Image (cartoon, rainbow, N blue to C red):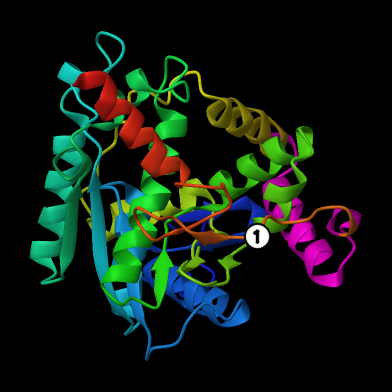
Amino acid sequence: MKCRKCQNKASVHMRQHKLALCKEHYLEWIPEQTEKFIKKYQMFTREEKILVAVSGGKDSLSLWEILVRLGYKADGLYLGLGIDTSTSLSAGSGIAYSQESQRLSEKFANEHNLKLHVVDIEKEYGQSIPMLAQSSHRGYGKPCAVCGLAKRHEMNRVARDLGYDVLATGHNLDDEAAVLFGNTLSWASEYLLRQGPVLPETNGLARKVKPLCRFYEREMTAYAMLSGIEYIYEECPFAEGSQSIFYKETLNQLETARPGAKLIFYLRFLEARKSGELFIEKNVKLGLLHACPKCGQPTSTPDFCSFCRMVEKANVKTE
């Protein structure tokens, strides 16, 4: 297989695009496409301050590298979740997962002379993610729901407090298609209405963007490897058996039979949203938001936000 641009031996073959590229041109193609997506969905400008949520994984570190390469003003945010062998809910779930992901995030920032904000959840609130999960009904034996709630709260808090205009995450097409698949199966109307490359800012909530939303996971893996980005290969030890993994595996089977199926599924959904063809919009009323009395972040609950109530409940149980 030859590179379409230079006719040298191709390093990456993308069946869904009917495109093959050598290393040099592939490392040019990904940032070029990212720039197109940023402009197409009007994510942000070069004048705005961007906070990239980094986890030490291939997607978030690649996103940070790409944005800086393109000339955007982007800093990083790492959240220490405390997901390690000693605090896991099940034995043998990983070796110092959080420490290793933090090490790689800090290593990347130092090598590229970039600013990385680090927030340790346990130091900040007295409870790690596994500890919060054990104290909350949200855990149900796994801390995934607790983790998602905590990450959303902290990412928005840091973006707001430090004056960033945009919060960028490294969600790729496989992530987005799996979420869309799950929400469609359960017809989660409110979540379907909020899914997209851009979630506009509202009072107290930062604008959230996903510049990698149209790249397949394997495309981002290839980019990270060819760029020499060192990242954590292991999945979160709690991810095994999760619904999102099941949805991804199901969609992968479809993709194998029909290359491009995931991209078509996601893009057709975005087109339907934009054109107003999603009839669910007429029947869904989004809740009114007010400021949480404790942390000041917007919430639809009548008193404290879900995160503050969860932390308060967990701390009461450990007293």
Q: Is residue 133 left or right of residue 140?
A: left
- Magenta span: predominant SS is helix
The residue depicted at 12 percent of the width and 45 percent of the height is 103
The residue depicted at 22 percent of the width and 56 percent of the height is 228
Q: Is residue 5 magenta?
A: no
The residue depicted at 50 percent of the width and 66 percent of the height is 209
Check the image and name the residue furthest to the bottom: 47
State which region is magenta: 256-281
Q: Is residue 267 magenta?
A: yes
Using the rendered view, name the quadrant where residue 281 is placed.
bottom right
Q: Residues within 10 Å of mark 1 (few under 14, many from 20)?
A: few
Q: Is residue 153 left or right of residue 244?
A: left
The residue depicted at 31 percent of the width and 10 percent of the height is 90
Q: Is residue 311 above or below residue 85?
A: below
- The answer to whether any part of residue 5 appears in the image is no
Q: Which residue is mark 1?
A: 288
Using the rendered view, name the quadrant where residue 73 is placed.
bottom left
Q: Is residue 186 left or right of residue 15?
A: right
For the C terminus, the image quarter is top left
Q: How far from the left and from the top, in percent, is residue 263?
A: 68, 54
